[in-house]
């Protein structure tokens, strides 16, 4: 099996490759099947890497929502991994699941899932075999309106509002984005923002330092996955560097967690002045490199 090194230099399984091999999509049945059989999660970082890749695979699947079918046969999740597994699984379900069904879990895994289901008020949907799990999905389908499988709601944020929140400062090479007071409720809002940003940036034909004001911005659990994915893509194509300020403790913590996993500098500051100082330093370093 392929290996990689984490920051602490401990070798772990390449969980992104594992996800590629273990995730299957059945478009006709609207089922995403995750095969966790004989998989061991020994460190929280393994969980994070696996779910990072799973989110990317769903984004590339062409469909926002799926029924999840999870095979837990002989899957071993060490106790230190359960919190990460639970939190990432919850976020994935809230964002992309029409219903989740699990089968063939060990007694220990079953106890843990049932305990968390009771605490977090979700249906564990645990079955002994795949056939019974598939039958449960067919029951769940009956409660889902057909239009949900075909369409999604429009954005609650208008394009004109997003346009008004974007400004360019050519002398400083800064693109400024004002997220002040925005509620990002889900993928439609995230896509409206990033579609507009990409359009405006393409018009300039150049890269910029990004300055993002998160004051009083709220990002719903359903919006974090698309926000992370679209932000990463935007930064890769158009950013000389990205700096954020005014974040809530929750948003700052999430950005720092993602930065640690995905190897970027979070650049999170309390004030605009601090953020501008950081951009000035980045701009100075870039100019030195250019010379």
Image (tube, rainbow, N blue to C red):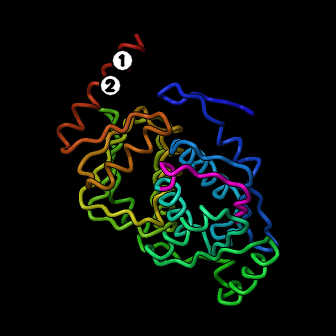
Does dot 2 land on a helix, a strand or a loop?
helix
Picture coordinates of residue 240, whole percent (x, y): 42, 32
Q: Is residue 232 left or right of residue 74?
A: left
Check the image and report above or below for 239 versus 66: above
Q: Nearer the viewer, residue 215 or 34?
A: 34
Any part of residue 113 in sight: yes
Quadrant of image for the C terminus: top left
Picture coordinates of residue 259, whole percent (x, y): 43, 39
Q: Looking at the image, which residue is at 56% across and 68% down?
A: 111
Query: Which region shows up in magenta?
Result: 70-82
Check the image and report above or below for 222 versus 283: below
Q: Are marks 2 and 1 in contact (CB under 8 Å)?
A: yes
Q: Residue furthest top?
A: 291
Query: What whole-number distance in Å separates the C-alpha atoms at marks 2 and 1?
Result: 6 Å
**Other-residue count near label 2 (Cα within 10 Å), few / some / many at <14 / 14–19 / ≥20:** some
Quadrant of image for the N terminus: top right
Q: Is residue 247 left or right of residue 233?
A: left
Q: Looking at the image, which residue is at 52% across and 69% down?
A: 94
Dividing the picture into quadrants, the one containing residue 172 is top left
Label at residue 287: 1
Picture coordinates of residue 72, whole percent (x, y): 70, 60
Q: Which residue is mark 2?
A: 283
Magenta segment includes 79: yes
Magenta segment includes 136: no
Does dot 1 land on a helix, a strand or a loop?
helix
Label at residue 103: none
How many marks on residues? 2
Q: Is residue 122 left or right of residue 62?
A: left
Q: Is residue 249 left or right of residue 63?
A: left
Q: Nearer the viewer, residue 134 or 230?
A: 134
Check the image and report above or below for 35 versus 220: above
């Amino acid at each position: 099996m392929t290996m990689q090194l984490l920051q602490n230099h401990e070798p772990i399984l390449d969980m992104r490759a594992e996800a590629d091999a273990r995730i299957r999509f059945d478009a006709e049945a609207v089922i995403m099947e995750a095969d966790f059989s004989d998989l061991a999660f020994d460190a929280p970082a393994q969980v994070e890497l696996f779910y990072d890749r799973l989110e990317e695979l769903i984004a590339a699947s062409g469909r926002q929502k799926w029924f999840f079918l999870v095979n837990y046969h002989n899957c071993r999740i060490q106790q230190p991994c359960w919190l990460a597994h639970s939190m990432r699984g919850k976020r994935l379900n809230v964002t992309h699941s029409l219903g989740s069904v699990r089968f063939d879990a060990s007694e220990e895994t079953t106890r843990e899932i049932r305990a968390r289901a009771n605490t977090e008020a979700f249906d564990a949907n645990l079955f002994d075999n795949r056939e019974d799990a598939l039958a449960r999905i067919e029951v769940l389908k009956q409660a889902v309106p057909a239009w949900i499988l075909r369409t999604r709601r429009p954005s609650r944020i208008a394009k004109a509002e997003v346009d008004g929140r974007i400004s360019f400062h050519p002398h400083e090479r800064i693109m400024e984005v004002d997220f002040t007071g925005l509620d990002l409720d889900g993928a439609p809002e995230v896509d409206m923002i990033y579609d507009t940003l990409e359009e405006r940036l393409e018009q300039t034909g150049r890269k910029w330092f990004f300055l993002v004001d998160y004051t009083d911005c709220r990002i719903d659990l359903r919006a974090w996955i698309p926000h992370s994915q679209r932000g990463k893509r935007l930064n890769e194509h158009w950013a000389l560097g990205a700096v954020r300020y005014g974040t809530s403790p929750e948003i700052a913590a999430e950005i720092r967690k993602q930065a640690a996993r995905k190897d970027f500098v979070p650049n999170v500051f309390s004030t605009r002045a601090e953020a501008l100082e950081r951009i000035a330093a980045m701009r100075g370093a870039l100019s030195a490199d250019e010379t």
